[in-house]
Image (cartoon, rainbow, N blue to C red):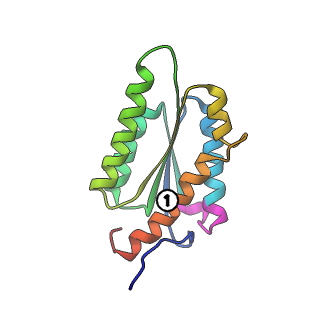
Amino acid sequence: MKIYQGVYDGKDKKFAIVVSRFNSMVTEKLLKGALDCLTRHGVSEDDIEVFWVPGSLETIFVAKQLVTAGRYDGIIVLGAVIRGETFHFEVVANEVARAMAQFNVIGKVPVTFGVLTTDTVEQAVNRAGAKLGNKGFEAALVALEMANLSEQFELV
């Protein structure tokens, strides 16, 4: 039996991180967590590129460009969509999740989904490092594992 699995080794790996500026008090903490994870696991700072976009919906355009660029071993998408008084929350959350899933279906580079979708600001802050860990760190950890797994199948 042959078992394939990724490891958390970032040596000689290149990552792109797409971050939404909207709800920046949360997304900046997600980015800090992702950067901490990548560098802690051997990714050189020179091999990390950060792309800031206005909002979570705009992460779709940039992620698509990065998936097709062929320069990265993994792409991490970070954002925070917090429920408001209108239907806008559902539209943005659903479209971003659907697009990222589609990139993983058709692309050759793993895209990890670190976009928080919460009911309150407090929930978002808690998931960005205040109480419940840092989902940016977790998204980067998944990117590391998937980049290494993908390499075993020569997909990247």
Quarter of the figure with residue 70: bottom left
Comparing 84 with 109, the one in front is 84
Q: Is residue 151 above or below residue 22?
A: below
What residue is drawn where x is 53% and y is 72%?
7
Residue furthest top as drawn: 85
Q: Is residue 67 left or right of residue 129?
A: left
Q: Is residue 42 magenta?
A: yes
* Residue 121 or residue 29, whichever sits in front: 121
Q: Is residue 50 left or right of residue 150?
A: right
Where is mark 1, residue-wise?
A: 143
- The residue depicted at 40 percent of the width and 58 percent of the height is 110
Q: What residue is at 63 percent from the left and 26 percent from the top?
A: 121
In the image, farthest residue toward the right: 130
How far across and down, in percent of the image, does residue 64 sit?
34, 47
Residue 53, given in percent of the width and then of the height, sits at: 48, 36
Compared across the picture, whether 61 is left or right of 148 comes to: left
In the figure, 143 relative to 61: above or below? below
- Which span is picked out in magenta? 38-47
Q: Quadrant of residue 67?
A: bottom left
The local secondary structure at tag 1 comes to helix
Quadrant of the rendering where the N terminus is positioned: bottom left
Q: Is 71 within the magenta?
A: no
Q: How many marks?
A: 1
- Percent from the top left, x then y, of residue 43? 59, 66
Q: Residue at x 56, y 59 (%)?
A: 141
* Residue that lies at the very extreme toward the bottom in this rendered image: 1
